[in-house]
Amino acid sequence: MPSDIALQRAERKRAEDKQELAEAAFEVFAERGYHATRIADITAQLGVGQSTFYKHFESKRAVVDHVLDQRLSAVMAAIGAENAPGAADTLDDYLAQVHRITVTVFRELATDQRALRVMVLEAVTVDPELEERWNGILEFARQIVVGYYANGIEKGYFSSEIDVDASSEACVGLLLGGLLRLLRAPDDEAGYVRYVDAALAMVVGGAVRE
């Protein structure tokens, strides 16, 4: 029987091969678009047969799920314990915390523009299931924003008259606008930091308790 070390090496090699296929797939998606890409185009990128692809993925749709899982996990890991709606006691605390979180999210997503392009521009066109998943991610983000508004209202630095549902949807819209900007200039960190500053000014302008 194979030793534990041999099994670990084999498992590591399978993971590396799977990751190479995923990266090759997104390289082709970026060039051709998801719908125009064939499995043969992906395997040709690596010079391997299609059977190699099907050892790791049942379809190109499965590749999208795999990479989406990776990117979301990376974002959540980067944010870590920072995402704590109840932590801010003052408006200044809120501004600093949300600024840090948003810049961290943009910085993490900027590390893989190919994945970001598929997520933002093509995810809703792949199939109804992925569209539903993407909408679920946006709703998850909206619920996080709701938590920050609720804390601000409770602590007294946001007005209790805020339309929290509509305002949280608007905040998610601002986030999507930032992602589109990130696609145009992923290396312009100073630019997306300015975007975050401007977006926060807009959010706070209509929310602060007078």
Image (cartoon, rainbow, N blue to C red):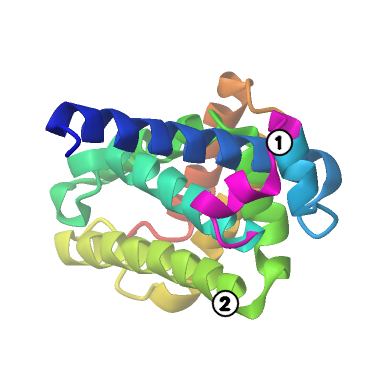
Q: Which residue is drawn at 28% across and 28% down?
A: 9
Specify few, some or many for label 1: CA neighbours under 10 Å numbering under 14, 14-19, or 20 or more.
some
Nearer-N-terminus badge (2/1): 1
Decide which of 15, 102 is in the foreground and name it.
15
Name the residue located 57 percent from the left edge and 42 percent from the top edge.
22
Residue numbers of the magenta segment: 45-59
Residue where numbered disc 2 is placed: 129
Judged from the image, the secondary structure of the residue bearing numbered disc 1 is helix
| SS label for mark 2 | helix
What residue is pinned by disc 1?
27
Q: Residue at x 21, y 62 (%)?
A: 151
Magenta: main secondary structure: helix
Q: In this view, does 53 lie to the left or right of 29?
A: left
The disc label shown at residue 99, or none: none
Please provide percent x and percent y for residue 175. Answer: 54, 51
Seen from the viewer's position, the closer of residues 146 and 141 is 141
- The residue under the point 82% across, 39% down is 31
